[in-house]
């Protein structure tokens, strides 16, 4: 896996400290390092958020150690304030920020492109284009960082991080570094002075000199490679997983003798001499990259500056619509675009095949993402919906990031409660704002949800804001005891660290009480009790009310496969579609373990996927769903 | 998903024409029949969407498609019918013979006495009455004996989803049922008695007696609670409420004395739906009972009820009560029935005016048929 290759690269570089915040597709990097933490004498932690993670990694660098910090694309936004200052203060031991990005937003609610941070904050950017490079480039990134005494960004994408390929491993270092932080030198001394971004102009100048040094190194980097004819008809410039797509597309169209590929691993700043050499070789240039036209802009800027020497080029890319400006690419998309430029025929699929495919596709039942069987969030949203409906003032929920985001992404899954969804912690901030609109005639009750991990990540400031500014909100923590969505990484609410060591847990209820909120705890599987508390909170004006809905994720290692109840449907009692029920369980509640037998016209429990939570027993108006305590295995 | 034809569901019909039109009486007829319709703080709430177009919720609603003519012909003796107060088989001034019952009763204790008799005679196994919590929020209560009946005697003035309790108890295996009902609740129960839906026939057959209450209006629990708070009255301390004859105020009796709230304030708490109600005497009950408050003779009459016997079932129960000496009756003062009819007619005219104001046309009477002969008589009077 690409992420394991990145972790291996860091190990080969002798990384000492690794930190991060879980986020698909980045999580396996820290997880892989955590496994070998003891064996390789590492300190590995899951930090409360990406900014803190970067600060933890930076401290190691200041003390002369090598450190890695991993996050998903939007994590860089969270870390960016510190990153700006870190980039100007400079670093000591090698430090690499790994950002794993999600073109097409396969597991995200954005397809942010954080390459621009490298340009904006003036730090070098590396992008591996295959699995071997994922390892090798990571290892080299530490050397580069120490060479220029600044942080280096390494960007991966889903198809790099989560795909697997062959990697030849190098040797692991045998010597371990000692931490040593010196700050008694001059303020301008990068190795002995205080680590600070002032005097700003002087340090900024120093930072730009470092970037020039990186550019010079990039000119001769073996990671930037060219393959193709000396004078190609079309020069294709690409990076990252797009290199794989481009190479495949050229192969599919058999254009190896007509089209050349310049694969760049060093994508910011671009090495001008290398670019000049290759731009000179062709009149037509195509730039293949995912999400924003970052590479395209930078190549064009360079080409404009060299126009006198290299002449005017014809560019193809995202900006002229040759390639889509959003979403993921694949070999087909690249091949189709390429075929147009070089005027060869290319058809992905035959018309007859496409026709048959369409026919078959129509038979696929419509399905949307939903909560797993036994998921506490389904029960939680059920009670939230009911409480809002009973309250009758058209209250709504500001959603947040976690599995429970599905409550907003798919309205029926959240029982039509949750109309907003943005970044981590933003639900509480938005709720805090909505609650202050009463003076403008907006008097709906405002609720917000967040998961336990999200609570620590970015919610606390917003919650304090709500309390201090008297925002009358009902704040709900969907506490499933883990960072469930990304694979149960530990968080500050738990008693085990990333490295498996015992750590003190930080109590969410205690924090909320300390800021002066009314706090209640409920089991979301107790629908009636939970709804009652919510209604009393909604009716209570003028205070910040917190309900912690606590129930472990159905997929958590301690719960998975262990049923609380065996659940069955008594067909004689099941009303099915008749008035009095009208398929409440399969039409509205919609746990995937409840299925509808069309011929019998009865609900059926799919025993294989039923997690045995027994919540459907509570919603059945006929008590036709029977639950009996499951035998302990 | 394949979208169903444009035919609106029962739930949508109720939402558009009853709930959103402020016609919902909160009687509870559409509640406890399914998981979709519930009552919360005297508001009918549609919890989730149901797409059935022939649901019970719509079938029993007293504010949707009311065919008064059909109800009269099915449930009453045509010879007994009056335009103002429905069927009158017998008319009495009555009170409970038991002075202890009279002490706790709102007026004469007739309702409680009749229900006690129905229970003790085994005519019914439980009586559904309105019972309030400390916040005076009402719900239907299943009384199985004299004690629990007496605990809940007295006028509540607050909307109660009594029919919801009937629906629930009827679905249980707990025998025959009597209901003490306001006019809207009695209308819903009458609609049920026509058995519009075959599969509920068994439940409805358990309904053996409906004792109707005279009713001018009810107040919304939430608004009334706010009004009490404004007047520094703790709802939990209230021991009784009354409207003295000829006075435009609500007297609230608490442990620490009486408080008087002017009608001007109470008016704003009246449930909007009550303004469109034509029935002040529970015309579709078996027996209807109310106060006997009349201007000149208030003091003399305050311990008595007016009682209208409407159906054969009602007649049987009242005859038995008289025979057993459970009820006392007296001669009605002159003109008292006329006065009742005039008051009832006035409510009908006011409600019709309000309905026409809402619908915008005398041809559209919302839940009522404009062709109904009885309604027409009052329509003509308004036009004049």
Image (cartoon, helix red, strand yellow):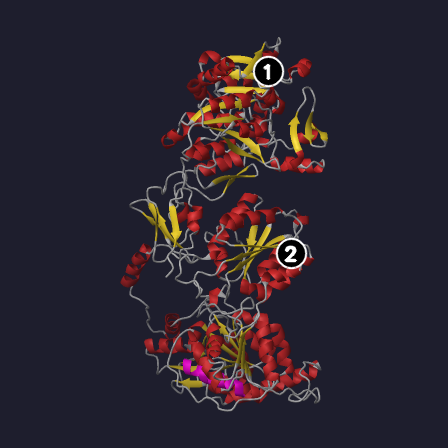
Q: How many marks?
A: 2
Residue A432: quadrant of the picture: bottom right
On screen, A351 above or below B295?
below
**Which quarter of the figure has residue A448?**
bottom right
> Who is closer to the viewer here, A23 or A552?
A552
Q: In the rendering, which numbered label is found on residue B340? A: 1
Label 1: chain letter: B
Residue A535 drawn at (x, y percent): 57, 47
Question: SS of the residue at dot 2?
Answer: loop
Give the image location of residue B268, x and y in percent: 66, 32
Residue at left 44%, top 83%? A133
Disc sitting over residue A367 in the figure = none
Which region shows up in magenta?
A: A131-143
Do we see residue B84 in this rendering?
Answer: no
**Quadrant in which residue A333 is drawn:** bottom left
**What chain letter is assigned to the residue under label 2?**
A
Give the vertical position of B187 relative to A20 (above or below). Answer: above
Farthest-out residue, bottom:
A175
- Is there one chain holding both mark 1 and mark 2? no
The percent position of residue B306, horizontal first and vertical second, equals 58, 16
Q: Quadrant of the C terminus of chain B?
A: top right
Report which residue position mark 2 lands on: A517
Is residue A33 in the magenta section? no
Residue B293 visible here: yes
Depth order, front residue of A420/A448:
A448
Q: Distance between the residues labelled 1 and 2?
A: 57 Å
């Amino acid at each position: 896996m690409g992420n394991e290759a990145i972790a291996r690269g860091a190990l080969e570089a002798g990384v000492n400290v690794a930190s991060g915040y879980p986020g698909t597709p980045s999580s396996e990097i820290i997880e892989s390092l955590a496994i070998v933490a003891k064996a390789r004498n590492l300190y590995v932690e899951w930090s409360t958020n990406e900014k803190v993670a970067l600060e933890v990694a930076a401290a190691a660098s200041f003390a002369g150690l090598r450190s890695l910090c991993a996050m998903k694309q939007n994590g860089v936004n969270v870390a960016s304030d510190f990153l700006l200052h870190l980039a100007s203060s400079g670093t000591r031991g090698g430090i690499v920020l790994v950002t794993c990005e999600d073109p097409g937003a396969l597991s995200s609610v954005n397809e942010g492109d954080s390459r621009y941070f490298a340009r904006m904050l003036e730090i070098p950017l590396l992008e591996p284009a295959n699995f071997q490079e994922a390892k090798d480039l990571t290892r080299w990134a530490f050397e580069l960082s120490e060479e220029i005494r600044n942080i280096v960004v390494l960007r991966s994408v889903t198809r790099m991080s989560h795909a697997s390929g062959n990697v030849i491993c190098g040797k692991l270092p045998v010597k371990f570094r000692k931490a040593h932080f010196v700050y008694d030198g001059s303020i301008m001394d990068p190795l002995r002075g205080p680590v600070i971004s002032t005097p700003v102009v002087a340090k900024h100048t120093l930072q730009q000199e470092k970037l020039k040094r990186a550019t010079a190194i990039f000119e001769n980097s073996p990671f930037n490679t060219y393959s193709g004819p000396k004078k190609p008809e079309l020069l294709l410039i690409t990076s990252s997983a797009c290199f794989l797509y481009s190479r495949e597309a050229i192969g599919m169209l058999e254009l190896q003798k007509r089209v050349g590929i310049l694969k760049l691993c060093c994508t910011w700043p671009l090495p001008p001499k290398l670019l000049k050499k290759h731009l000179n070789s062709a009149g037509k240039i195509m730039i293949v990259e995912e999400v924003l036209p970052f590479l395209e802009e930078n190549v064009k800027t360079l080409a404009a500056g060299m126009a006198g020497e290299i002449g005017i080029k014809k560019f193809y890319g995202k900006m002229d619509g040759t390639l889509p400006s959003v979403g993921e690419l694949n070999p087909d998309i690249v091949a189709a675009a390429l075929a147009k430029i070089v005027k060869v025929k290319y058809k992905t699929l035959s018309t007859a095949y496409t026709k048959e495919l369409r026919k078959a596709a129509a038979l696929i039942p419509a399905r949307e993402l939903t909560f797993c069987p036994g998921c506490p969030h389904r029960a939680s949203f059920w009670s939230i919906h009911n409480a809002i409906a009973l309250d009758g003032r058209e209250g709504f929920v500001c959603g947040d990031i976690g599995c429970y985001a599905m409550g907003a992404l798919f309205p029926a899954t959240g029982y039509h409660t949750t109309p907003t969804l943005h970044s981590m912690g933003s639900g509480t901030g938005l709720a805090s704002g909505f609650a202050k609109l009463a003076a403008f005639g907006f008097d709906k009750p405002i609720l917000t949800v967040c998961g336990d991990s999200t609570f620590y990540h970015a919610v606390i400031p917003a919650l304090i804001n709500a309390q201090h500014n008297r925002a009358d909100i009902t704040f709900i923590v969907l506490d499933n005891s883990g960072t469930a969505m990304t694979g149960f990484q530990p968080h500050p609410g738990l008693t085990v660290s990333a490295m498996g060591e015992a750590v003190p847990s930080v109590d969410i209820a205690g924090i909320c009480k300390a800021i002066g909120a009314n706090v209640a705890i409920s089991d979301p599987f107790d629908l009636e009790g939970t709804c009652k508390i919510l209604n009393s909170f909604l009716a209570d004006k003028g205070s910040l009310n917190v309900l912690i809905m606590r129930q472990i994720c159905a997929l958590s290692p301690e719960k998975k496969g262990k049923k609380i109840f065996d659940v069955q449907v008594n067909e004689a009692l099941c009303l099915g579609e008749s008035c009095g029920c009208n398929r409440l369980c399969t039409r509205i509640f919609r746990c995937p373990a409840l299925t509808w037998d069309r011929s019998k016209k009865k609900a059926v429990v799919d025993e294989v996927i039923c997690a045995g939570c027994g919540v459907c027993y509570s919603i059945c108006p006929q008590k036709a769903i029977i639950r009996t305590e499951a035998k302990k295995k | 998903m394949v979208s169903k034809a444009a035919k609106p569901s029962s739930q949508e019909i109720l939402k558009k024409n009853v709930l959103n039109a402020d016609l919902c009486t909160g009687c509870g007829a559409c509640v406890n029949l399914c998981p979709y319709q519930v009552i919360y703080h005297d508001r009918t709430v549609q919890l989730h969407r149901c797409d059935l177009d022939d649901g019970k919720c719509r079938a029993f609603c007293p504010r949707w498609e009311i065919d008064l003519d059909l109800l009269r012909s099915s449930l009453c003796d045509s010879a007994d019918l009056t335009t103002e107060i429905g069927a009158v088989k017998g008319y009495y001034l009555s009170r409970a013979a038991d002075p202890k019952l009279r002490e706790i009763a709102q007026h004469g204790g007739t309702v409680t006495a009749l229900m006690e008799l129905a229970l003790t005679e085994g005519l019914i196994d439980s009586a559904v009455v309105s019972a309030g919590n400390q916040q005076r929020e009402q719900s239907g209560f299943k009384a199985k004996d004299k004690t629990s009946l007496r605990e809940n005697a007295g006028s509540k003035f607050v909307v109660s989803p009594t029919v919801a309790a009937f629906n629930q108890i009827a679905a249980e295996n707990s025998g025959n049922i009597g209901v003490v009902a306001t006019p809207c609740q009695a209308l819903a129960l009458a609609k049920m008695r026509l058995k519009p839906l075959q599969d509920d026939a068994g439940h409805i057959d358990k309904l053996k007696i409906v004792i109707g209450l005279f009713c001018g209006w009810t107040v919304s629990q939430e608004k009334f609670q706010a009004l009490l708070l404004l007047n520094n009255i703790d709802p939990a301390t209230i021991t009784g409420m009354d409207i003295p004859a000829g006075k435009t105020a609500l007297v609230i009796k608490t442990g620490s004395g009486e408080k008087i709230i002017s009608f001007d304030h109470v008016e704003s708490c009246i449930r909007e739906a009550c303004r469109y109600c034509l029935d002040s005497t529970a015309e579709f009950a078996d027996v209807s009972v109310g106060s006997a408050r009349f201007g000149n003779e208030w003091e003399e009459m305050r311990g008595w009820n007016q009682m209208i016997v409407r159906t054969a079932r009602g007649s049987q129960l009242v005859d038995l009560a008289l025979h057993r000496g459970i009820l006392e009756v007296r001669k009605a003062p002159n003109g008292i029935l006329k006065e009742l009819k005039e008051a009832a007619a006035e409510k009908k005219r006011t409600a019709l005016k309000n309905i026409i104001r809402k619908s915008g046309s005398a041809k559209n009477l919302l839940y009522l048929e404009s062709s109904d002969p009885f309604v027409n008589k009052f329509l003509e009077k308004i036009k004049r």
